[in-house]
Image: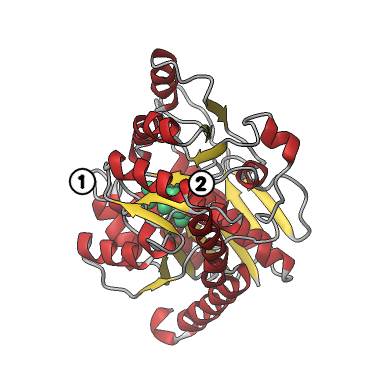
Amino acid sequence: MKIGIVCYPTYGGSGVVATELGIALANKGHKIHFISYKKPARLNKYYQGIVFHEVTSMEYPLFEHSPYETALASKLVDVILNEDLDILHVHYAIPHASVAFMAKQIAASKGKIIPVVTTLHGTDITLVGTDPSYAPVVEFSINHSDGVTAVSSFLKQATEERFNVTTDINVIYNFVDTEKFNEHGNLSLRRSFAEDHQKILVHVSNFRKVKRVQDILNAFPKINSTIDCKLIMVGDGPERKSLEETCRKEGLCTDVHFLGKQDAVNQLLAISDVFLLPSANESFGLAALEAMACGLPVVSSNAGGLPEVNIHGKTGFVHTIGDTHMLASHCISLLQDRALYDEMSKNAKAQLSNFSIQEILTKYENFYVSTIEKTKQPSFL
Ligand code: GMT
């Protein structure tokens, strides 16, 4: 199939999923066209069968904000027609689903029918999408996509509760490429952070408020007073600066390392012991799944779809959002009991069988085929 993929190119989860999906589809022989304003971060080498189309918009003194949606729609029409796409898959509803709707209408006016699949990722529904400044457009574009998927059962339900949804939403979970997230810990890398008897806690995110990273810093001194440990913070975003200030004020800088955005997240996970994700809102928690692939038990909040990924008492522990006391005591229980740790580490890795790239890829391929078939029926023409 010739598949167009629209996504955010940044380090956010939706862009990661879209890129990994495109790479996996290209490996199976599909021709993939990524369309975005910047090359997706994970598209960091040449992949056969993948082409990137950059969206550029003309600057003009009248425009205080350059109209990205118009430029994206125009680029989509160009790629749909000239590359003769079979299907367009947009990730994150805002603004991609409504722009795809517009491009689809323009392509139809030129005699080309293009089915559109929209994947809902989380904040496009739970946080941003319900804001009155976006809600009517989000609802319309969900209902006018030819196929809609959500990355967890939680997100499907949340969408149905928040919007008047008149179409089926299919749950297709996120996945991890276990070949990539299967590193053996590099001892000298590990020793650059911690001594051999110390444990390493790790957090990876875009440091937005919704991640509640402050909870980790609140819990850390308590954990560290019982278990000698270090904390690695990977990623960047609006909250990082104040978190670093907290560390300076509280004298935590020798134990807490802020690394900023990193490509080799797999190598950092491989040298760590426990993954922390105390989010207030999380439709799935891809970062937790990537850590589990490396055998890390997860201590997470019970936000959104997290309990579908991190099974309490099996692959790690789940606490109520904001309960930093439990966060700390879960980490301590896990790190104090070697047998419990080994069992949870094994279970975390085993949990990946529910989120294997092969299985999820087939689900997407089948979904594309059935969506294309559906749009061929006369009532859709
Ligand atoms: O919150 C992020 O990390 C970014 C955001 C995105 O859309 O780029 O992530 C959402 O999509 C990810 C991939 O499907 C999910 O794993 C995250 O749980 C989800 N984030 C939230 O719901 C807050």
Residue at 24 percent across and 50 percent down: it is: 130
Given the current orientation, which residue lies at the most extreme top position? Answer: 249
Nearest to the observer: residue 220 or residue 68: 220
Along the horizontal axis of the image, is 88 left or right of 312? right
Along the horizontal axis of the image, is 318 left or right of 296? left
User: Mark 2: which amino acid?
Assistant: Val
In the picture of the structure, the residue carrying the numbered disc 1 is 132
Residue 53 on image: x %, y % = 65, 48
Q: Which color mode does the image show? A: secondary structure
User: Mark 1: which amino acid?
Assistant: Pro
Q: Residues within 10 Å of mark 2 (few under 14, many from 20)?
A: many
Instruction: Say above or below: 138 vs 194.
Output: below
Residue 33 occupies which quadrant of the picture? Answer: bottom right
Question: What kind of element bears circle 1?
Answer: loop
Residue at 55 percent across and 38 percent down: it is: 200
Nearest to the observer: residue 324 or residue 60: 324
> Mark 2 or mark 1: which comes first in sequence?
1
Along the horizontal axis of the image, is 62 left or right of 15? left
Instruction: Say above or below: 127 vs 145.
Output: above
Nearest to the observer: residue 167 or residue 234: 234
Residue 279 on image: x %, y % = 35, 45
Is ligand 1 closer than 8 angstroms to the Cβ of mark 2? no
Q: Residues within 10 Å of mark 1 (few under 14, many from 20)?
A: few
In the picture of the structure, the residue carrying the numbered disc 2 is 274
Q: Nearer the viewer, mark 2 or mark 1?
A: 2
Nearest to the observer: residue 168 or residue 98: 168
